[in-house]
Image: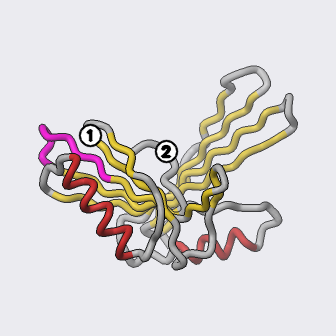
Amino acid sequence: MGFAPASPELKKERESDILLRYTFQDRQLSYYISAQTDKNKNESYFLLKVISPTANADLAQVEKKLHKDELDWQYYYLYTGKINHYLDKESRAAIIQVIIDNLGAKGGELYEDDNASSMASFTPLFDNGITVQEQKYNVQVAARSIQRQQEAIVYIGQPLIMGDY
């Protein structure tokens, strides 16, 4: 089974907070669990990040296990890929549009800076999504490329990309 637990890390950022991080490996999946409790608000938040280095991992099985719990889980998927070539703004926009089109997604605006481009959109392929300012989104595509590294990283988040890219 390959279960390899790690020691939990416990710390307090403020007197009212308790933050717990725990990491373990099961087969080829890596699990990163974070929990934060705010004693003043009497609230707790859990984040479970599951990472697979292979494309054949069935992350839906993890989701099914979480559905058995009484907690109201929200699921965000992130897929990444690397292109061994620098992409300028125009090329990043083009590759994002190709992915959006292939997903049958509609709407969204392109956001860009010197090194990254991103677009959030909606596709009927996915059941879940979020609403931001009366606009529904369920997929976000981003590309990041730095000329001196001569590579580009492409991100597909469902429903959105959580964290930095």
Viewer-side residue, 92 vs 159:
92
Residue 34: quadrant of the picture: top right
Mark 2 vs mark 1, CA separation in Å: 16 Å
Viewer-side residue, 65 vs 142:
142
Q: Earlier in the sequence, mark 2 or mark 1?
A: 1
Neighbourhood count class around disc 2 (C-alpha, 10 Å): few under 14, some 14–19, many 20 upward: few
Residue located 33% across and 68% down the image: 99
Vertical placement of 90 versus 94: above or below?
Answer: above
- Would you say 29 lies left or right of 136 here? left
Q: Amino acid at mark 2?
A: Gly
Viewer-side residue, 126 vs 81:
126
Q: Is-magenta flag for residue 145?
A: yes
- Would you say 73 lies left or right of 2 here? right
Residue named by callout 2: 163
Picture coordinates of residue 61, whole percent (x, y): 59, 77
Q: Amino acid at mark 1?
A: Asn
Picture coordinates of residue 145, whole percent (x, y): 23, 46
- Residue range (magenta): 143-150
Residue named by callout 1: 115
Query: Residue 4 got which mark?
Result: none
Picture coordinates of residue 7, whole percent (x, y): 58, 44
Residue located 85% across and 33% down the image: 41
Dot 2: what SS? loop
Residue located 61% across and 64% down the image: 129
